[in-house]
Amino acid sequence: MNSWVRLHEDDHVVIALQPFAKGDQLSLEGGYALTLLDEVPKGHKVLTHAVRKGEHVLKFGYSIGVAKEDIEPGSWVHTHNMGTGLKGFLDYSYEPAAQDQVKAQSPDAGRTFQGFIRENGEVGIRNEIWIINTVGCINKTCEIVARKAHALYEGRVDGVYHFAHPFGCSQLGDDLVHTQKLLASLVNHPNAAGVLVIGLGCENNQIDAFKRAIGEHSPERVKFLKSQEAEDEIEEALELVEELVRYAEHFKREPVPVSKLKLGLKCGGSDGLSGITANPLVGAVSDRLIEAGGTAILTEVPEMFGAETILMNRAADERVFGKIVHLINDFKQYFIKHDQEIYENPSPGNKAGGISTLEEKSLGCTQKGGHAVVQDVVPYGERITSSGLNLLEAPGNDLVSVTALSAGGAHIVLFTTGRGTPFGGPVPTVKIATNSELAGRKKNWIDFNAGRLLEDKSMGTLTDELWEQLISLASGETQTNNERNGFKEIAIFKDGVIL
């Protein structure tokens, strides 16, 4: 294995694939020997071309920031000597990139998985019962119901789950609407064969109002219970769950075209290898699914800043281009409204892993979207209606964005990480390690090791492996670690007044 990698021929930097000490030598292209002037951690950047103060530093073939001082070849490039080159609002123009020629029919177009076809024609990959509470003050009630029902009906359905949240009471205006939309989209998710909605009775998110947010629904599939009107809400809830279980048992797995599959794309705890291994791998799988007629959903809007023009130039048409511009600028305005710096994004963990600026993080992050045309932009809390690549409005926060992807309709979320996390969303959450050290150390978290790209596997081989793993997962033949460990959580985006 090489000790470094350059991602584009124009790049000023190479990425260290192992830790280096000051004085070590790198053998670069053409046999050129570069002596390191600093200690450089694994995943971090080494400058190979001199850059003067104020000049842009290139990685991925794009600027990832501006030099704060003159930097000499062999130097470690990080936050101490490079800062963001982004500032303020930008003017965007519609400059569509040349689209690829129409491809021959995908070899996966006739591929199927074993899924559940619902009465409304939608497809699920799990046959679960979900308990959705309208308000946070009945979290424990719903938790008790879910725990008892999960034990009672094990083997008859794929599980009974509740997703705790603190909202629904005393929220006002758009903030309440966002909560209702998000929860309503979860109610409508086809991985849930049946849903029990439990309310309290005095909350702002009243059941009658929430029914309007849910829209048309089958009374066999969605049941409602108002706790304040029940003599024993836990007993009555369990009776309703029994009805939902009997309804769910009518559904059996059957062959479903892979074009029905929707993947959510997410990264968290990124490191300097995220944009080299796991994110490009996810992009390749996303492209493969889309070529077969399926759907991929990319979110984390603040982590598009600095790479947004790449997505804009891939818009299906000028209308979609305009929606991407609004998506980006509306999120920048959200930062400004709260007196926060727009372009300060990488977390302490990101920086420790080798990511120095927002544009560097964004250029790696957007690779999860592959090379497909952007077909639509969808507001937070709403469901995806277009096949192909969609952009979804949500922040970068792991729990909030995975919840939004799930509510948007993702059957599975592909979650790339360089540092690891145990959590999972309402749908199977596939943790993809950027490096083999993490994959080996946290086997109870990690589902797939993309670090092998730097060792003994090609991109084509790993794409095939991950693709087959997803088909098996969608067919119920395997589970993710978050499912086996019982980690299924949600978080709701909060931006408003609570009384």
Image (cartoon, rainbow, N blue to C red):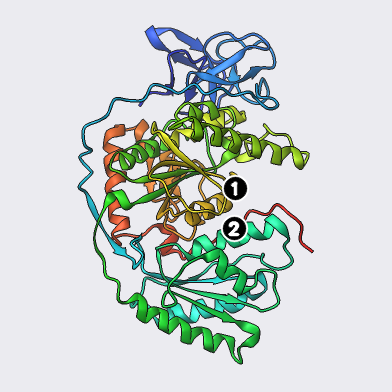
Looking at the rendered structure, the secondary structure element under dot 2 is: loop
Q: Position of residue 212 (x, y in %)?
A: 56, 67
Q: Position of residue 22 (x, y in %)?
A: 57, 19
Q: For residue 472, which quarter of the picture? A: bottom left
Residue plotted at (53% across, 9% down):
49
Classed neighbour count for the residue bearing mark 2: other residues with Cα under 10 Å, few (<14), some (14–19), many (≥20):
many
Q: Is residue 23 above or below residue 461?
A: above
Q: Which mark is residue 397?
A: 1
Looking at the rendered structure, the secondary structure element under dot 1 is: loop
Query: Disc 2 residue type?
Result: Ala
Residue plotted at (23% across, 53% down):
112
The residue pinned by badge 2 equals 491
Direction from residue 193 to residue 88 in the image, left or right = right
Image quarter where the N terminus lies is top left
Q: Which mark is residue 296?
A: none
Q: Position of residue 27 (x, y in %)?
A: 42, 13
Q: Is residue 325 above or below residue 155?
A: above
Q: Position of residue 380 (x, y in %)?
A: 57, 50
Q: Nearer the viewer, residue 111 or 14?
A: 111
Q: Nearer the viewer, residue 314 or 137?
A: 314
Image quarter where the C terminus lies is bottom right
Classed neighbour count for the residue bearing mark 1: other residues with Cα under 10 Å, few (<14), some (14–19), many (≥20):
some
Direction from residue 82 to residue 23 in the image, left or right = left
